[in-house]
Every structure is written in structure tokens, then in C-alpha cells.
Amino acid sequence: MPRPEPHDPRGLTGRRILITRSADRAKPLASLLTGLGAAPLVLPLIDFERAKDQAILDDVLDRLGAGEFDWLVISSITSARVLLEKAAERGTNPAGLVPEATRVATIGPSSLRVLESIGLSVHLAPTQLQSADGLVELWESAPARVLLPQADIAAPGLREGLASKGADVTSVVAYRTVDYPAVAELRLTAELPAAVEASEDRVPPMLSPDEARAALDAGTVDAVVAASPSAARRIAHTLPPLGRCRLVAIGRPTAAEASRLGLTVAATAKEPTPDGIVAALESVFANEGNPQ
């Protein structure tokens, strides 16, 4: 394995950053890192498959179209990809699935941009605490019928938080989170617009698990990014010992899960975005450069 370039002890130049996402989902962060002189690497650990029970999902989407819900809450970019796929099956676009009277909420700026890019108007999204908790804090206490499509392993916090504010929440499994790679015929393949996925950026080098293990053992990976609690679980199962490699979490739920699994979290992004992750990485290496 080639030796890494010398790095700036207080910055990202020359730092080798392992992103535990598929290559397409890693590109926005990888592009930022490359621009700052870092060397992003990709190790896909999780993937996404269609929900097993498509009949249930189709039924709630029929109910959505019939106006049975006051709110549609999209809590992940992957849920937006599900909407794209289901809309295509029906010969429409995502906006065609959502009546004008139904409002849309999400959990932060990244998912807001994605939803707007596929034609949905977002009526509520937190700007301070950009997470499920942040959305619950903003939610007005009042009766409301809410559709919440989520992953099969989604934590109950958002559903329970909305219910505590008086919402009648219909939660449905929209997709399954699985170890990479997904079964080809089950993989969720809907592609977000190029502006969101930064599809023109060069795909960063992708490592195999054995190559990642060798790099960690050699001490040539400076940081690993966990972009979800499920990614933290796969990191804990697949990568330890991390050695000198620092773990950076995309947000508090991911950091909490990593800590629960015995991983040391070097920094947590204040915002769950590529910019937020970069800022967290910069803080780690800047602190290391400071005298104790």
C-alpha cells in the first residue's frame, strides 16, 4: 500500500479519511475533503434494499394521495429515494404523490435540499438542532395525522416524540438497512438529482474490508467517518481495533451509538452535513496540533 503524503499537523492536508458509505453517497464529502488537500477513501459498510412488504407501503401511499394525512415527515435521504422509486412506478414524480394540502417536514438542511430537488415543498425543518429531536422541538402541539416512512431499524424517538405532541403517527417501513452489498434485485437504485449527489465529482478510491484492515494496522488512516448509527454498528463489528485512527460521528445519535459500542468518538459534527463533518475533522487535527 502506498505511503501517505506528509500532512499538515494542524489541518487536513495529506490526511487519509475513511468514509463508510457507498461511493455515490460519499462523493459530496469526498469532494470537500479533496479540495482541502485530504485523501478520502471509501469503505461501503451498509446498503439499502426495498421494504419486504411493498403492499403495506403502497397502501399508505394510496392513503397519502387520497388526503388522509396532514403531514408527510421524511427523516432521511434514503426515504426520499424511496419516494422517487415509488413515484416512477406510478408514472409520476414525488410531488404527484403528495396532495397540496399535505405539508412536508424533514430533519435538516441536507434532507430539505434533497426534497426540494425532487419537487417537494418543505414546510418545516429545524435549523439549530438538525435531527429528529430538533424537529420534535419545533413541532406544534396539536392533533395531526402524520405519515412517517422510515428504515426498518429506525429508532422510535421521532415517532414517539411526534405522538407526544398530539400527532396520530402512521409509521411504515420504507426500506431495509443491510450489510453491504445489498441483494442486486432488491437494492434501492433510485438516483437523486446530480446537483444533490455531486455525480460529476471523481469517485474516491474504494477499499475492500481487507485493504481497510491493512491500512488501519499500518496506521495510515487518520480518521473514519460514521454517517449513521447503523454505520457505527458496522464499524464496531468490522474495523476495530482502530489504533491511531480517530472516529468522527455525523451527529449525536451516531456518536451515542458508537460510544455505547465501546468506540471512542473524537468529534461529533455540529451539523449533519458534509461541511459539518469537515469542521469536526478540522477540530480534531487542530486540537492535536495544540500544545498540551
Image (tube, rainbow, N blue to C red):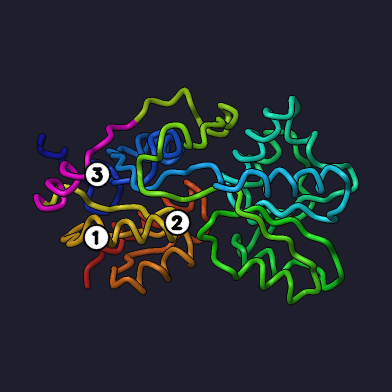
* Residue holding disc 3: 16
Q: Position of residue 211 (x, y in %)?
A: 16, 41
Name the side, left or right, on which 8 lies relative to 90.
Answer: left
Mark 2 or 1: in front is 2
Residues at marks 3 and 1, CA–CA distance in whole angstroms: 17 Å
* Residue holding disc 2: 228
Mark 2 or 3: in front is 2
Name the side, left or right, on which 33 lies relative to 196.
Answer: left
- Residue in view at x 76 percent, y 55 percent: 124
Residues at marks 2 and 1, CA–CA distance in whole angstroms: 28 Å
Helix, strand or loop for disc 2: loop
Name the side, left or right, on which 273 lies relative to 64.
Answer: left
* Residue holding disc 1: 289
Q: Nearer the viewer, residue 81 or 118?
A: 81
Instruction: Judge the density around disc 1: few (<14), some (14-19), many (≥20) Cα neighbours within 10 Å.
Output: few
Q: Earlier in the sequence, mark 2 or mark 1?
A: 2
Q: Is residue 238 above or below residue 135?
A: above
Q: Amino acid at mark 2?
A: Ser
Q: Position of residue 272 (x, y in %)?
A: 52, 54
Instruction: Judge the density around disc 2: few (<14), some (14-19), many (≥20) Cα neighbours within 10 Å.
Output: many
Quadrant in the rendering for residue 166: bottom right
Helix, strand or loop for disc 3: strand
Q: Position of residue 81 (x, y in %)?
A: 59, 38
- Residue in view at x 30 percent, y 64 percent: 287
Residue 206 lies in the magenta-colored region = yes
